[in-house]
Image (cartoon, rainbow, N blue to C red):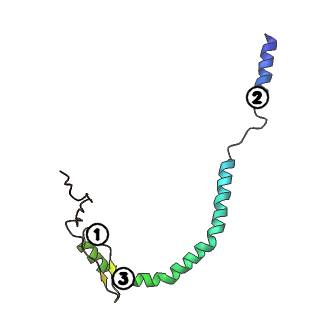
Amino acid sequence: MRHFITICAISAALTQPAHAEDDSGPSLMEQGAELFFEGLRKEMEPAFDELLGLADQFGPAMQSFMAEMGPALADLAAEIEDWSTYEVPEILPNGDIIIRKKSETPEIEPVQPQDAPEGEIDI
């Protein structure tokens, strides 16, 4: 029996990992995700810088547009309750924009009679 306990103790000791992982650092998956996002950030940095430059350039123009047109657009949105009742805007050659309201009843296409041989009447 003594040998059995010794064998079990040695087996248990050998099945344990040689070094225990300490949970203080990030796992390999976390490290990989951090490296992936760092690389992505470095690749996208020039595009973000360009976007910020465009925002600096167009920001004042957009602010003045919203200051002038904002109230008019709000009045228009309050007047038009449901945009789905209107057709797609149409731009005429002279630059006018026409927005037609959809008709209440849908247009019904006339039913074309099927070609039947002459002399026969289908009852």
Residue 67 image offset from top left, x and y in percent = 36, 82
Q: Earlier in the sequence, mark 2 or mark 3?
A: 2
Q: Are marks 3 and 1 in contact (CB under 8 Å)?
A: no
- Give the residue at x 68% y 43%: 23
Q: Is residue 30 left or right of residue 64?
A: right
Say which of 22 and 27 sits in front: 27
Residue 39 image offset from top left, x and y in percent = 67, 63
Figure quadrant of the N terminus: top right
Please tell me how crowded label 2 is: few (under 14), some (14-19), or many (20+) other residues with Cα within 10 Å.
few
Q: Where residue 83 is drawn, which disc sits there?
A: 1
Whether residue 19 is visible, yes or no, is yes
Say which of 33 and 8 sits in front: 33
Circle 3 residue? 67
Residue 27 image offset from top left, x and y in percent = 68, 47
Disc 3 or disc 1, which is closer to the eye? 1
- Give the residue at x 74% y 38%: 20
Separation of residues labelled 2 and 3 (CA atoms): 73 Å
Query: Which amino acid lies under the numbered mark 1 shown in the image of this protein?
Result: Trp
Q: Which residue is at the far top?
A: 1
**Above or below, 111 relative to 27:** below
**Above or below, 35 relative to 73:** above
**Above or below, 17 relative to 1:** below
Query: Which amino acid lies under the numbered mark 2 shown in the image of this protein?
Result: Thr
Q: Is residue 45 left or right of residue 110?
A: right
Disc 1 or disc 2, which is closer to the eye? 1
Please tell me how crowded label 3 is: few (under 14), some (14-19), or many (20+) other residues with Cα within 10 Å.
few
User: Element at badge 2?
Assistant: helix
Circle 2 residue? 15
User: Element at badge 1?
Assistant: helix
Separation of residues labelled 1 and 2 (CA atoms): 70 Å
- Give the residue at x 78% y 21%: 9
Q: Earlier in the sequence, mark 3 or mark 1?
A: 3
